[in-house]
Amino acid sequence: MPNDASGLPVGRGLLYLIVAGSTWGTAGAVASLVYRASDMGALGLSFWRCALGLLLLLAGRGLRPRTRPAAAGPLSRRVLRAVATGLGLAVFQTAYFAAVAATGLAVATVVTLGAGPVLIALGARLLLGERLGAGGVLSVAGALAGLAVLTLGDSAATVRPAGVLLALLSAAGYGAMTLLTRWWGRDGGADASDTTVWSFAVTTLCLLPFALHEGLLPHTAHPARLLWLLCYIAAVPTALAYALYFAGAAVVRSATVSMIMLLEPVTAAVLAVLLLGERLTLGTAVGTLLMLTAVAGPAVSEATLRRAHPATGADEGSLPGLTAR
Protein backbone atom coordinates (compact mmCIF):
# COMPACT_ATOMS: atom_id res chain seq x y z
CA MET A 1 0.00 0.00 0.00
CA PRO A 2 1.22 3.55 -0.67
CA ASN A 3 2.76 5.66 1.99
CA ASP A 4 0.29 8.51 2.39
CA ALA A 5 2.96 11.08 3.12
CA SER A 6 5.10 10.53 0.03
CA GLY A 7 2.85 8.71 -2.46
CA LEU A 8 5.49 6.00 -3.08
CA PRO A 9 4.12 2.50 -2.52
CA VAL A 10 5.93 0.71 0.30
CA GLY A 11 6.44 -2.34 -1.93
CA ARG A 12 8.25 -0.23 -4.49
CA GLY A 13 10.30 1.33 -1.71
CA LEU A 14 11.38 -2.16 -0.63
CA LEU A 15 12.39 -2.98 -4.21
CA TYR A 16 14.41 0.24 -4.41
CA LEU A 17 16.24 -0.69 -1.22
CA ILE A 18 16.99 -4.23 -2.45
CA VAL A 19 18.59 -2.84 -5.61
CA ALA A 20 20.48 -0.21 -3.61
CA GLY A 21 21.81 -2.73 -1.09
CA SER A 22 22.95 -5.13 -3.82
CA THR A 23 24.78 -2.44 -5.79
CA TRP A 24 26.35 -0.97 -2.63
CA GLY A 25 27.98 -4.35 -2.14
CA THR A 26 30.04 -3.74 -5.29
CA ALA A 27 31.45 -0.38 -4.08
CA GLY A 28 33.96 -1.89 -1.68
CA ALA A 29 35.27 -4.30 -4.31
CA VAL A 30 35.71 -1.46 -6.79
CA ALA A 31 37.47 0.59 -4.09
CA SER A 32 39.93 -2.28 -3.57
CA LEU A 33 40.60 -2.35 -7.32
CA VAL A 34 41.14 1.43 -7.31
CA TYR A 35 43.70 1.06 -4.51
CA ARG A 36 45.50 -1.62 -6.51
CA ALA A 37 45.54 0.45 -9.71
CA SER A 38 46.68 3.78 -8.19
CA ASP A 39 47.85 5.57 -5.06
CA MET A 40 44.43 7.17 -4.51
CA GLY A 41 43.41 7.32 -0.84
CA ALA A 42 40.04 6.96 0.84
CA LEU A 43 39.35 10.71 0.97
CA GLY A 44 40.20 11.24 -2.70
CA LEU A 45 38.10 8.28 -3.75
CA SER A 46 35.17 9.41 -1.65
CA PHE A 47 35.41 12.94 -3.09
CA TRP A 48 35.49 11.79 -6.71
CA ARG A 49 32.67 9.34 -6.05
CA CYS A 50 30.45 12.15 -4.73
CA ALA A 51 31.54 14.81 -7.23
CA LEU A 52 31.00 12.60 -10.28
CA GLY A 53 27.84 11.15 -8.76
CA LEU A 54 26.51 14.67 -8.22
CA LEU A 55 27.11 15.54 -11.89
CA LEU A 56 25.23 12.41 -12.95
CA LEU A 57 22.34 13.20 -10.60
CA LEU A 58 22.10 16.76 -11.95
CA ALA A 59 22.16 15.45 -15.51
CA GLY A 60 19.42 12.98 -14.63
CA ARG A 61 17.26 15.74 -13.17
CA GLY A 62 17.67 17.74 -16.37
CA LEU A 63 16.45 14.81 -18.46
CA ARG A 64 13.40 14.12 -16.30
CA PRO A 65 10.01 15.31 -17.59
CA ARG A 66 8.90 18.44 -15.78
CA THR A 67 6.32 17.77 -13.11
CA ARG A 68 4.45 19.99 -10.72
CA PRO A 69 6.87 20.70 -7.85
CA ALA A 70 5.93 19.32 -4.46
CA ALA A 71 5.30 21.73 -1.63
CA ALA A 72 8.67 22.71 -0.20
CA GLY A 73 9.21 23.24 3.48
CA PRO A 74 10.89 26.30 5.00
CA LEU A 75 14.33 27.10 3.61
CA SER A 76 15.98 26.68 7.00
CA ARG A 77 14.57 23.16 7.33
CA ARG A 78 15.69 22.18 3.83
CA VAL A 79 19.19 23.49 4.50
CA LEU A 80 19.34 21.62 7.82
CA ARG A 81 18.19 18.42 6.12
CA ALA A 82 20.80 18.72 3.36
CA VAL A 83 23.65 19.51 5.76
CA ALA A 84 22.78 16.76 8.25
CA THR A 85 22.27 14.10 5.59
CA GLY A 86 25.35 15.21 3.67
CA LEU A 87 27.55 15.01 6.76
CA GLY A 88 26.20 11.55 7.59
CA LEU A 89 26.90 10.45 4.02
CA ALA A 90 30.44 11.85 4.14
CA VAL A 91 31.25 9.97 7.35
CA PHE A 92 29.54 6.79 6.17
CA GLN A 93 31.32 6.29 2.88
CA THR A 94 34.71 7.86 3.67
CA ALA A 95 35.17 5.84 6.87
CA TYR A 96 34.03 2.74 4.97
CA PHE A 97 36.61 3.20 2.22
CA ALA A 98 39.30 3.79 4.87
CA ALA A 99 38.19 0.61 6.65
CA VAL A 100 38.45 -1.37 3.40
CA ALA A 101 42.03 -0.13 2.98
CA ALA A 102 42.87 -0.91 6.62
CA THR A 103 41.33 -4.33 7.19
CA GLY A 104 40.00 -5.69 3.89
CA LEU A 105 36.70 -5.66 2.04
CA ALA A 106 34.85 -8.50 3.77
CA VAL A 107 35.57 -7.47 7.38
CA ALA A 108 34.98 -3.74 6.73
CA THR A 109 31.62 -4.37 5.08
CA VAL A 110 30.37 -6.91 7.60
CA VAL A 111 31.29 -4.73 10.60
CA THR A 112 29.73 -1.62 9.05
CA LEU A 113 26.47 -3.29 8.11
CA GLY A 114 26.39 -5.53 11.19
CA ALA A 115 26.71 -2.61 13.60
CA GLY A 116 24.21 -0.53 11.64
CA PRO A 117 21.03 -2.24 12.94
CA VAL A 118 22.27 -1.90 16.53
CA LEU A 119 22.88 1.83 16.21
CA ILE A 120 19.62 2.32 14.32
CA ALA A 121 17.67 0.48 17.03
CA LEU A 122 19.20 2.68 19.73
CA GLY A 123 18.68 5.82 17.67
CA ALA A 124 15.06 4.90 16.99
CA ARG A 125 14.47 4.65 20.74
CA LEU A 126 15.89 8.14 21.29
CA LEU A 127 14.68 9.96 18.16
CA LEU A 128 11.51 8.17 17.08
CA GLY A 129 10.13 7.37 20.55
CA GLU A 130 10.28 3.58 20.21
CA ARG A 131 11.46 0.95 22.65
CA LEU A 132 13.16 -2.38 22.04
CA GLY A 133 10.91 -5.41 21.92
CA ALA A 134 11.99 -9.04 22.20
CA GLY A 135 13.03 -9.16 18.53
CA GLY A 136 15.02 -5.98 18.92
CA VAL A 137 16.88 -7.36 21.93
CA LEU A 138 17.74 -10.52 19.97
CA SER A 139 18.92 -8.44 17.04
CA VAL A 140 21.19 -6.27 19.20
CA ALA A 141 22.59 -9.28 21.06
CA GLY A 142 23.27 -11.20 17.86
CA ALA A 143 24.95 -8.27 16.17
CA LEU A 144 27.16 -7.58 19.20
CA ALA A 145 28.11 -11.26 19.43
CA GLY A 146 28.97 -11.27 15.74
CA LEU A 147 31.14 -8.18 16.13
CA ALA A 148 32.94 -9.75 19.12
CA VAL A 149 33.66 -13.01 17.28
CA LEU A 150 34.71 -11.16 14.16
CA THR A 151 37.06 -8.84 16.05
CA LEU A 152 38.55 -11.33 18.53
CA GLY A 153 38.28 -14.60 16.64
CA ASP A 154 41.02 -13.97 14.10
CA SER A 155 44.60 -12.77 14.16
CA ALA A 156 45.52 -9.12 13.76
CA ALA A 157 46.73 -9.89 10.24
CA THR A 158 43.15 -10.57 9.19
CA VAL A 159 41.13 -8.21 11.39
CA ARG A 160 42.92 -4.98 12.26
CA PRO A 161 41.46 -2.97 15.19
CA ALA A 162 41.95 0.35 13.38
CA GLY A 163 39.93 -0.94 10.45
CA VAL A 164 37.16 -2.17 12.76
CA LEU A 165 36.97 1.25 14.45
CA LEU A 166 36.72 2.95 11.07
CA ALA A 167 33.95 0.53 10.08
CA LEU A 168 32.07 1.34 13.31
CA LEU A 169 32.41 5.05 12.52
CA SER A 170 30.99 4.33 9.08
CA ALA A 171 28.09 2.48 10.70
CA ALA A 172 27.38 5.53 12.88
CA GLY A 173 27.19 7.75 9.81
CA TYR A 174 24.93 5.23 8.07
CA GLY A 175 22.64 4.98 11.08
CA ALA A 176 22.32 8.76 11.37
CA MET A 177 21.56 9.07 7.67
CA THR A 178 18.90 6.33 7.80
CA LEU A 179 17.15 7.69 10.89
CA LEU A 180 17.09 11.26 9.64
CA THR A 181 15.77 10.22 6.23
CA ARG A 182 12.96 8.22 7.83
CA TRP A 183 12.18 10.96 10.38
CA TRP A 184 11.82 13.67 7.75
CA GLY A 185 10.04 11.32 5.34
CA ARG A 186 7.18 10.49 7.72
CA ASP A 187 5.38 13.80 7.13
CA GLY A 188 6.04 13.95 3.40
CA GLY A 189 8.27 16.99 3.77
CA ALA A 190 11.29 15.35 2.12
CA ASP A 191 11.59 15.05 -1.66
CA ALA A 192 13.87 12.11 -2.42
CA SER A 193 15.40 13.73 -5.50
CA ASP A 194 16.18 17.00 -3.73
CA THR A 195 17.50 15.16 -0.68
CA THR A 196 19.89 13.11 -2.82
CA VAL A 197 21.23 16.02 -4.89
CA TRP A 198 21.72 18.48 -2.02
CA SER A 199 23.20 15.81 0.24
CA PHE A 200 25.80 14.97 -2.39
CA ALA A 201 26.56 18.66 -2.88
CA VAL A 202 27.21 19.07 0.86
CA THR A 203 29.29 15.90 1.00
CA THR A 204 31.40 16.97 -1.98
CA LEU A 205 32.14 20.37 -0.43
CA CYS A 206 32.99 18.77 2.93
CA LEU A 207 35.41 16.31 1.36
CA LEU A 208 37.16 18.72 -1.03
CA PRO A 209 39.71 20.24 1.41
CA PHE A 210 40.60 16.83 2.85
CA ALA A 211 40.95 15.33 -0.63
CA LEU A 212 43.18 18.23 -1.68
CA HIS A 213 45.40 17.61 1.35
CA GLU A 214 45.58 13.88 0.64
CA GLY A 215 46.11 14.34 -3.11
CA LEU A 216 43.28 14.92 -5.53
CA LEU A 217 44.95 13.55 -8.68
CA PRO A 218 46.37 10.05 -8.15
CA HIS A 219 49.40 8.53 -9.80
CA THR A 220 48.60 5.43 -11.83
CA ALA A 221 50.13 3.26 -14.52
CA HIS A 222 46.63 2.33 -15.73
CA PRO A 223 44.70 5.59 -16.32
CA ALA A 224 42.02 4.02 -18.51
CA ARG A 225 41.28 1.32 -15.91
CA LEU A 226 41.17 3.88 -13.11
CA LEU A 227 38.81 6.13 -15.08
CA TRP A 228 36.49 3.20 -15.79
CA LEU A 229 36.44 2.21 -12.13
CA LEU A 230 35.68 5.78 -11.01
CA CYS A 231 32.89 6.12 -13.58
CA TYR A 232 31.34 2.85 -12.40
CA ILE A 233 31.51 3.73 -8.71
CA ALA A 234 29.99 7.15 -9.41
CA ALA A 235 27.18 5.84 -11.61
CA VAL A 236 25.95 2.54 -10.15
CA PRO A 237 26.59 2.29 -6.37
CA THR A 238 26.37 6.09 -6.02
CA ALA A 239 24.03 8.07 -8.30
CA LEU A 240 21.65 5.16 -8.92
CA ALA A 241 21.89 3.43 -5.55
CA TYR A 242 21.59 6.53 -3.36
CA ALA A 243 18.67 7.92 -5.37
CA LEU A 244 16.86 4.61 -4.78
CA TYR A 245 18.00 4.48 -1.14
CA PHE A 246 16.70 7.93 -0.16
CA ALA A 247 13.38 7.26 -1.91
CA GLY A 248 12.93 3.87 -0.23
CA ALA A 249 14.21 4.88 3.21
CA ALA A 250 11.64 7.69 3.40
CA VAL A 251 8.70 5.24 3.27
CA VAL A 252 10.10 2.01 4.78
CA ARG A 253 10.65 1.59 8.50
CA SER A 254 14.21 2.20 9.64
CA ALA A 255 14.97 -1.26 11.02
CA THR A 256 13.59 -2.82 7.83
CA VAL A 257 15.96 -0.61 5.87
CA SER A 258 18.90 -1.80 7.96
CA MET A 259 17.93 -5.44 7.42
CA ILE A 260 17.64 -5.08 3.65
CA MET A 261 21.00 -3.34 3.54
CA LEU A 262 22.54 -6.56 4.89
CA LEU A 263 22.46 -7.59 1.23
CA GLU A 264 25.57 -5.44 0.92
CA PRO A 265 27.91 -7.60 3.04
CA VAL A 266 26.65 -10.73 1.29
CA THR A 267 27.47 -9.23 -2.11
CA ALA A 268 30.78 -7.82 -0.89
CA ALA A 269 31.88 -11.08 0.74
CA VAL A 270 31.20 -13.03 -2.46
CA LEU A 271 33.14 -10.49 -4.53
CA ALA A 272 35.98 -10.46 -2.01
CA VAL A 273 36.45 -14.21 -2.40
CA LEU A 274 35.80 -14.50 -6.14
CA LEU A 275 37.54 -11.37 -7.45
CA LEU A 276 40.01 -10.15 -4.82
CA GLY A 277 41.40 -13.42 -3.49
CA GLU A 278 40.48 -12.70 0.16
CA ARG A 279 40.04 -15.69 2.47
CA LEU A 280 37.12 -15.94 4.86
CA THR A 281 38.55 -17.54 8.00
CA LEU A 282 36.46 -19.47 10.51
CA GLY A 283 36.15 -16.48 12.84
CA THR A 284 35.07 -14.20 10.01
CA ALA A 285 32.54 -16.76 8.79
CA VAL A 286 31.07 -17.28 12.28
CA GLY A 287 30.91 -13.53 12.91
CA THR A 288 29.20 -12.99 9.57
CA LEU A 289 26.69 -15.75 10.27
CA LEU A 290 25.86 -14.32 13.69
CA MET A 291 25.24 -10.84 12.31
CA LEU A 292 23.10 -12.12 9.46
CA THR A 293 21.14 -14.26 11.93
CA ALA A 294 20.61 -11.14 14.05
CA VAL A 295 18.06 -9.89 11.55
CA ALA A 296 15.77 -12.87 12.24
CA GLY A 297 14.38 -11.28 15.42
CA PRO A 298 13.11 -8.09 13.76
CA ALA A 299 11.89 -10.08 10.74
CA VAL A 300 9.74 -12.34 12.95
CA SER A 301 8.43 -9.34 14.88
CA GLU A 302 7.44 -7.57 11.68
CA ALA A 303 5.67 -10.66 10.32
CA THR A 304 3.77 -11.03 13.61
CA LEU A 305 2.86 -7.35 13.56
CA ARG A 306 1.49 -7.58 10.03
CA ARG A 307 -0.59 -10.65 10.87
CA ALA A 308 -2.01 -8.83 13.87
CA HIS A 309 -2.85 -5.73 11.79
CA PRO A 310 -3.59 -6.97 8.26
CA ALA A 311 -5.71 -3.96 7.37
CA THR A 312 -3.08 -1.35 8.16
CA GLY A 313 0.09 -3.26 7.39
CA ALA A 314 1.29 -2.42 10.90
CA ASP A 315 2.00 0.96 12.29
CA GLU A 316 4.25 2.90 9.91
CA GLY A 317 5.87 4.61 12.84
CA SER A 318 7.00 1.40 14.51
CA LEU A 319 10.01 -0.65 13.61
CA PRO A 320 10.44 -4.40 13.21
CA GLY A 321 11.78 -5.65 16.48
CA LEU A 322 10.77 -2.37 18.10
CA THR A 323 7.51 -1.55 19.82
CA ALA A 324 5.97 1.91 19.77
CA ARG A 325 5.21 3.47 23.11
Image (spheres, rainbow, N blue to C red):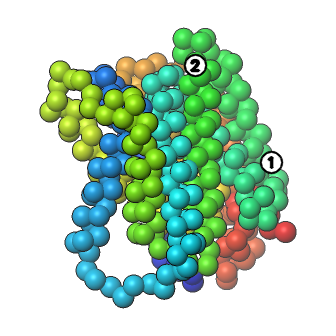
Q: Residues within 10 Å of mark 2 (few under 14, many from 20)?
A: many
Q: Is residue 118 above or below residue 126?
A: above
Q: Which is more foreground, mark 1 or mark 2? A: 2
Rendered image: mark on residue 137? 1
Q: Going 69% across and 47% down the picture, which residue do you hit?
A: 119
Contact between labelled residues 2 and 1, with CB atoms less than 8 Å apart: no
Locate residue 226 relative to residue 300 in the image: left or right: left
Nearest the viewer among 286 and 21 is: 21
Q: Residue furthest left?
A: 224
| Disc 1/disc 2 C-alpha distance (Å) | 26 Å
Nearest the viewer among 238 and 40 is: 40
Q: Which residue is mark 2?
A: 159
Q: Going 53% across and 43% down the picture, which residue do you hit?
A: 91
On-image quarter of the C terminus: bottom right
Locate residue 311 relative to residue 282 in the image: left or right: right
Q: Residues within 10 Å of mark 1 (few under 14, many from 20)?
A: some
Locate residue 323 relative to residue 246 in the image: left or right: right
Find numbered disc 2 in the image and state the secondary structure of the residue it sits on.
loop
* Amino acid type shown at disc 2: Val
Q: Going 42% across and 69% down the picture, which residue do you hit?
A: 194
Is residue 293 in view from this perspective?
no
Nearest the viewer among 231 and 313 is: 231
Locate residue 97 relative to residue 312 in the image: left or right: left
On-image quarter of the N terminus: bottom right
Is residue 34 in view from this perspective?
yes
Find numbered disc 1 in the image and state the secondary structure of the residue it sits on.
helix
Rendered image: mark on residue 108? none
* Amino acid type shown at disc 1: Val
Nearest the viewer among 119 and 82 is: 82
